[in-house]
Amino acid sequence: MHHNNKIKIRLNHYLAHAGISSRRGADKLIQSGAIEVNGKPVLKLGTIISTNDIVKFNGSKIRYKNKIYILLNKPKGFITTTRDQFNRKTVMNLIPSISEYRVFPVGRLDRSTTGVLLITNDGYMAEKLTHPKYHIKKIYHVSLNKEIRNEDLDRIRQGKIYLKEGKVKVIFVNKKNARNQVEIGLYIGWNRVIKRIFKKLNYQVVRLDRINFGGLSKRNIKIGNWCFLSKKEIENIIKY
């Protein structure tokens, strides 16, 4: 998938698109002098290049690749990493092998958590979707080990739950028709935050399903299945 037509693009976007800066900030790489364009080191941030230019990172040529966005309805028992040292099943086992695109999951869902997960090779977008300042909304369907008391729901609503990172602010929390089931929406992406909120109130989360991520819902995708999304759908998540 080559671009024959010239596209003008900022160098740091180009690096992020190529999957280079999902690991480190592209600007730092540019400042470090590791990036060459057409044989010359480029140190100036904000440099605009064309996709026909030859860009090298530490001497190796970078290819500008098409962006891929995959929406997965994650099943239980898979971990959200690209590889696992203990050979456990990862979410990458569920999608087609498009290894030349070096896709990776955006953010984390616990092994036992199910639901909406985005997998991409767009480092620039992934960084935005996990950055707290963009207020990406997540909605979870939670099954607890017992019926939740209304006063506990109120404590969550009123921001009276404190975890080590600070006060827990939620957008909403409501009991579902089954009495031990709750729907909760929040912006924070702290590690295992939902399980910790309920543990603080002496409940155990039996099942956790993310039903929405920044407006992306499961769209009738069966558990374990996936579909491609367009760039536009991803850009809609980040409402400036």
Image (cartoon, helix red, strand yellow):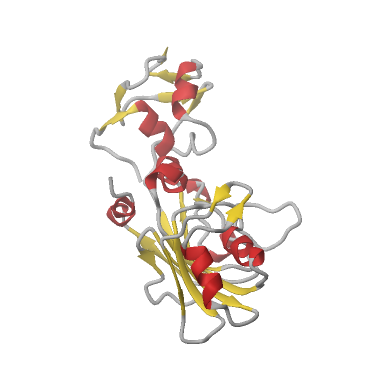
- Horizontally, residue 227 falls left or right of residue 209, namely left
Q: Is residue 228 left or right of residue 33?
A: left
Image coordinates for residue 46, horizontal then vertical, percent: 33, 22
Instruction: State the residue at coordinates (33%, 54%).
Output: 237
- Residue that extends furthest to the front in the rendered view of this protein: 151
Say if 165 sits above or below 211 in the image.
above
User: Can residue 168 be spotted in the picture?
Assistant: yes
Residue 105 seen = no
Coordinates of residue 229 in the picture (x, y in percent): 35, 60
- Residue 141 versus residue 119: which sits nearer the camera? 141
Frontmost residue, 203 versus 20? 203
Residue drawn 49% across and 51% down? 106
On-image quarter of the C terminus = top left
Residue 131's x, y, as percent?
45, 43
Residue at (61% x, 52% y) in the render: 163
State the image quarter where residue 208 is shown: bottom right
In the picture as drawn, the residue positioned furthest to the bottom comes out as 178
Q: How many marks?
A: 0
Tell which of 25 and 171 is nearer to you. 171
**Does 151 appear above or below 70?**
below
The answer to whether residue 10 is above or below residue 18 is: above
Q: Position of residue 16 (x, y in %)?
A: 42, 36
Closer to the camera, 181 or 214?
181
